[in-house]
C-alpha cells in the first residue's frame, strides 16, 4: 500500500498542463494550471475549478503518461 501511495505522489509531481486526470470524487478533468499545492482543472468547456493536488486519484483511462 505504501508503494502505491509513493507511485501516486511521484505521478502528481510530474503532472503538467494538458494532462487528463481523475479526481478522488470520480470527476474527469484536464489540468490547465499548476500551483504549489493545487491544480486548476477544466471539467467542462467553460467550467474550471481549483483542487488540491491530493485530490488527484490518477491518470484518466486512455491518458497514458509519456516520459521525456
Image (tube, rainbow, N blue to C red):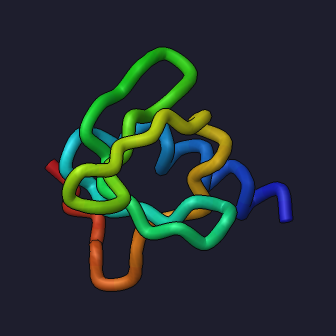
Judge by depth and name the residue closer to the eye, 48 or 63. 48
Q: Which residue is nearer to you in this view: 64 or 31? A: 31
Is the residue 7 above or below the residue 31 in the image? Answer: below
For residue 52, above or below residue 3: above
Q: Residue at x 14, y 48 (%)?
A: 68
Residue situated furthest front in the rendering: 46
How many numbered callouts? 0
**Residue 46 shown left or right of residue 15 in the figure:** left
Q: Residue furthest bottom?
A: 62
Name which residue lies at 35% across and 43% down.
48
Q: Residue placed farthest to the right in the image?
A: 1
Residue farthest along the top direction in this orientation: 36
Q: Residue at x 25, y 39 (%)?
A: 32
Q: Does 57 sit left or right of 21 as displayed? A: right
What x and y, as percent, mark residue 1? 85, 65
Residue 13 versus residue 30: which sits nearer the camera? 30
Q: Position of residue 39 (x, y in %)?
A: 44, 34
In the rendered image of this protein, does residue 2 appear above or below residue 12?
below
Q: Position of residue 19 (x, y in %)?
A: 27, 55
**Residue 51 located left or right of residue 1:** left
Residue 5 falls in which quadrant of the image?
Answer: bottom right
Q: Is residue 8 left or right of residue 13?
A: right
Q: Where is 25 relative to 62, above or below? A: above
User: Residue 43: where, in percent of width, then height?
Assistant: 36, 59
Amino acid at each position: 500500500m505504501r508503494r502505491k501511495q509513493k507511485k501516486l505522489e511521484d505521478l502528481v509531481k510530474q503532472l503538467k498542463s494538458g494532462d487528463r486526470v481523475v479526481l478522488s470524487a470520480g470527476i474527469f478533468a484536464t489540468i490547465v494550471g499548476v500551483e504549489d499545492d493545487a491544480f486548476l482543472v477544466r471539467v467542462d468547456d467553460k467550467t474550471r475549478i481549483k483542487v488540491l493536488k491530493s485530490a488527484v486519484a490518477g491518470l484518466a483511462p486512455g491518458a497514458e503518461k509519456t516520459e521525456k
